[in-house]
Amino acid sequence: MPAVTIPDAVSASLAAAAVTGPVELHDEAGRVLGEFVPRRPPPADGGPDPPSRWLDEDPPGTTGDPQHTDPESIAAWIAEYRALPASDLTDEEYAAFKALLAEKKAEDTAMSEARMDALIRRYNG
């Protein structure tokens, strides 16, 4: 990942704001430049630095769900998934499901194209 050196005044500003989690960085005109995620101090046990995202936050859509990444937990998730019964859809339910997927794909494609066009306009002036 490329690194950007910020002036001491900006570093002091972040420290003074007691930034403890992700924040948006804006230029003086108010345009969003990006996101800053502060590092936590290294673990007391001398282990490796934690990743840039906080490990104790639940990822979106998983509030309260354990997110352990050790091999035993992953094996348990896989076993739980494999134990789920198969879903039997009627022909009508399956057709409705396929139609919904096609509609969602069309919406996602249109949204992606609109975002891409906006980015092209933004960076090409």
Image (cartoon, helix red, strand yellow):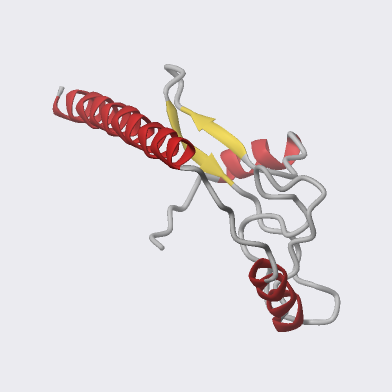
**Vertical relation: 14 (above or below) 110:** below
Q: Residue at x 44, y 35 (%)?
A: 92
Left or right: residue 16 versus residue 111 is right
* Residue at the far left in the pictured view: 124
Residue 60 x %, y %: 65, 43
- Residue 93, horizontal then vertical, whole percent: 48, 37
Q: Nearer the viewer, residue 4 or 97?
A: 97
Residue 75 position in % (x across, y down): 69, 79
Residue at left offset 66%, top offset 36%: 13
> What residue is shown at x 34% (from left), y 33% (from top)?
108
Depth check: give the residue in front, 29 or 36.
Answer: 36
Quadrant assignment for the N terminus: bottom left
Q: How many numbered marks have been drawn onto this rendered protein structure?
A: 0
**Figure check: 81 above or below 48:** above
Occupied quadrant, residue 72: bottom right
Looking at the picture, how far across and down is residue 102, in whole percent? Answer: 32, 35
Which residue extends farthest top? Answer: 29
Relative depth, front residue between 26 and 105: 105
26 to the left or right of 13: left
Q: Quadrant of the C terminus?
A: top left
Image position of 81 (left or right of 46): left
Instruction: Name which quarter of the figure residue 22 lies in.
Output: top right
